[in-house]
C-alpha cells in the first residue's frame, strides 16, 4: 500500500429534517451569504427550511450560479461579500453551487488575480472564507471534499482546483431533497458517482485490498439502487443509500494509498467546456472507450472488477472485455448515451482541439501510469464516435 495522509474536517449531518440544525453549525452573529443556483430551492422548499432555521441571522442572498459554474458569475459574489462584510457562506445546491462557493471562498482573500487560482492551479491551503453546504443533488461528493471545477466562460476552459482550506465546515445531507430532482439529474448522479469509483479503482492490481473492497461495494450498491432510485426517488431507503454512496465515492477515502486515473474526467471536462454536455454524460461517453484503448494496461483490474462486481466467469481476457460491456449496459440503463452524436470530421477536430489544449498545459501523460499520451487521448476521443 502507498503511504498516505487522511485529513477530512467536514462535519456531515445526514438524514431527514437536519436542515433545522443550521443554527448549531453557523456562529451566532455571522453575516451569511446564502448562495444558490437557478431557483430549484424555491420550488422544493429547501430555501424556506433554511431561512426558517436561520431566523435572526443577517443574510444576503446570491442566486444564479449556473450548472458548471462560471468564474465570471462567481466574481460577482466575491464583490458582494466585500461590499457587505460577509463572514460565512452557505451553499445550497448541487455540485455546481458547492464548487462555486469553494471558488468564492478562495477568491475573497486571494492575494492577486483570482483567475490564477484556476489557470495556475494554485493550491488553497489557507485564507479561505468559512462555508457550509446543504446538498440538494447527490453526485459529485463536493459536499465532503476539497476539490472544485470552475469554467472560465470567456475562454471556454473548465479547470479543477482545490486545497486543504476548501473542505466545507459542514454539509447537511437530507436524502428527501432528491424527490424534486428531474430524472435526468438522478441518472447523472448515479453515473458520476460510479465513475468516481472507477477512476480510483480501475487502474492496476495493487495491495490496497481494503480500498478495493470498499470501492467494489460502492459500485455494487449503485448497481443495486440506481435503476430503482431514478424511478422512485421518494423511497427513503433508495434515496439515503444513493446519497451516501455518492459522498463515499469522492470524499477521499477510497483514494488513500492506491493509484488513481482521472483521465476520463479530464477529457470529459473538455467536452462540457466545448459543447455544454452534462458532466456525467461526458463520463459515460469517454470512460468505456478509455478502458478499451488502455485495455492492455488495465486488463487485470478489469478482470477483477468483472469477477467481483458482475460475477463474470471465463478467461481473464474474456471477463475483462465483458466487464466493459457490462459497464456500458449499466450506463445505458441509466439513460446515458455512450457515443458522441457527431460526424467523423467534427470528431477529428474535437480530438485535435483537446490534444492541443492538453499539450499546452503540459499534460503529456495522464492516468495511473502516465501512459495515456496525447496520441492515446486522440484515440479515445475518436473511439467515442
Ligand atoms: O440551479 P438549480 O436551479 O438549483 O438546478 C439544478 C441544476 O439545474 C438542479 N437541481 C439541483 N438540486 C435539485 C435540482 N433540481 C431539483 N431538485 C433538486 N433537489 O440540477 C441541475 C444540475 O445541478 P449541478 O449542481 O450542476 O449538478 P451536479 O451536482 O451534478 O454538479 C456538476 C458540477 O460538479 C462538477 C462538475 O464538473 C460540474 O461542474 N464536479 C465537481 C466535483 C468535485 N467538486 O469534487 C467532482 C465531479 O467529478 C465534478 O467534476
Ligand atoms: Zn465527476
Image: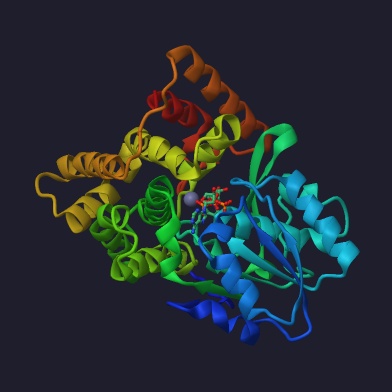
Name the image quarter holding residue 8: bottom right
Residue that appears at 74% across and 82% down: 56
| Left or right placement of residue 324 versus residue 117 in this view | left
Q: Nearer the viewer, residue 108 or 195?
A: 108
Q: Is residue 65 visible in this depiction of the protein? A: yes
51, above or below 315, in the image:
below
Which residue is farthest left?
A: 314
248, above or below 149, in the image:
below
**x and y percentages locating residue 10 in the rendered image:** 57, 76
Describe the colour scheme in one phrase. rainbow
**x and y percentages locating residue 54 in the rendered image:** 67, 79
Residue that appears at 88% across and 54% down: 112
Q: Nearer the viewer, residue 230 or 180?
A: 180
Q: Is residue 5 visible in this depiction of the protein? A: no
346, above or below 308, in the image:
above
Q: Quadrant of the N terminus?
A: bottom left
The count of marks equals 0
| Left or right placement of residue 74 versus residue 280 in this view | right
**x and y percentages locating residue 173 in the rendered image:** 48, 71
Q: Quadrant of the C terminus?
A: top left
182, above or below 44, in the image:
above
| Left or right placement of residue 28 versus residue 263 in this view | right
Name the image quarter holding residue 36: bottom right
**x and y percentages locating residue 364 in the rendered image:** 57, 36
Amino acid at each position: 500500500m502507498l503511504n498516505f495522509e487522511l485529513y477530512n474536517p467536514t462535519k456531515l449531518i445526514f438524514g431527514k429534517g437536519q436542515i433545522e440544525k443550521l443554527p448549531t453549525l453557523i456562529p451566532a452573529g455571522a453575516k451569511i451569504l446564502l448562495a444558490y443556483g437557478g431557483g430549484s430551492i424555491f420550488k422544493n422548499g429547501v430555501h424556506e427550511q433554511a431561512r426558517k432555521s436561520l431566523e435572526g441571522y443577517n443574510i444576503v442572498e446570491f442566486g444564479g450560479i449556473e450548472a458548471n459554474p462560471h468564474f465570471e458569475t462567481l466574481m460577482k459574489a466575491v464583490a458582494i461579500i466585500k461590499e457587505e462584510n460577509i463572514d460565512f457562506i452557505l451553499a445550497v445546491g448541487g455540485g455546481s453551487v458547492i464548487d462555486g462557493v469553494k471558488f468564492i471562498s478562495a477568491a475573497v482573500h486571494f492575494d492577486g488575480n483570482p483567475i490564477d487560482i484556476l489557470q495556475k492551479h494554485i493550491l488553497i491551503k489557507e485564507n479561505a472564507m468559512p462555508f457550509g453546504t446543504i446538498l440538494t443533488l447527490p453526485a459529485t461528493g463536493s459536499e465532503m471534499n476539497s476539490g472544485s471545477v470552475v469554467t472560465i466562460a470567456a475562454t471556454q476552459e473548465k479547470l479543477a482546483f482545490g486545497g486543504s482550506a476548501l473542505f466545507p465546515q459542514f454539509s447537511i445531507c437530507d436524502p428527501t431533497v432528491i424527490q424534486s430532482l428531474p430524472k435526468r439529474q438522478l441518472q447523472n448522479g448515479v453515473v458520476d458517482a460510479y465513475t468516481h469509483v472507477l477512476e480510483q479503482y480501475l487502474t492496476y492490481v495493487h495491495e490496497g485490498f481494503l480500498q478495493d473492497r470498499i470501492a467494489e461495494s460502492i459500485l455494487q450498491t449503485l448497481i443495486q439502487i440506481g435503476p430503482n432510485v431514478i424511478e422512485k426517488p421518494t423511497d427513503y431507503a433508495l434515496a439515503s443509500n444513493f446519497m451516501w454512496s455518492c459522498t463515499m465515492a469522492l470524499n477521499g477515502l477510497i483514494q488513500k494509498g492506491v493509484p488513481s486515473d482521472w483521465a476520463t474526467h479530464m477529457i470529459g471536462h473538455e467536452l462540457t467546456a466545448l459543447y455544454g454536455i452534462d458532466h456525467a454524460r461526458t463520463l459515460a461517453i469517454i470512460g468505456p472507450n478509455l478502458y478499451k484503448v488502455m485495455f492492455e494496461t488495465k486488463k487485470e483490474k478489469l478482470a477483477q472488477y468483472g469477477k467481483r462486481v458482475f460475477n463474470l466467469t471465463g478467461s481473464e481476457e474474456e471477463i475483462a472485455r465483458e466487464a466493459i460491456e457490462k459497464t456500458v449496459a449499466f450506463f445505458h440503463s441509466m439513460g446515458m448515451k455512450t457515443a458522441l452524436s457527431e460526424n467523423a470530421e467534427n470528431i477529428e477536430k474535437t480530438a485535435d482541439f483537446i490534444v492541443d489544449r492538453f499539450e499546452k498545459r503540459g499534460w503529456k501523460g495522464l492516468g495511473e501510469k502516465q501512459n495515456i499520451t496525447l496520441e492515446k487521448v486522440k484515440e479515445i476521443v475518436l473511439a467515442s464516435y
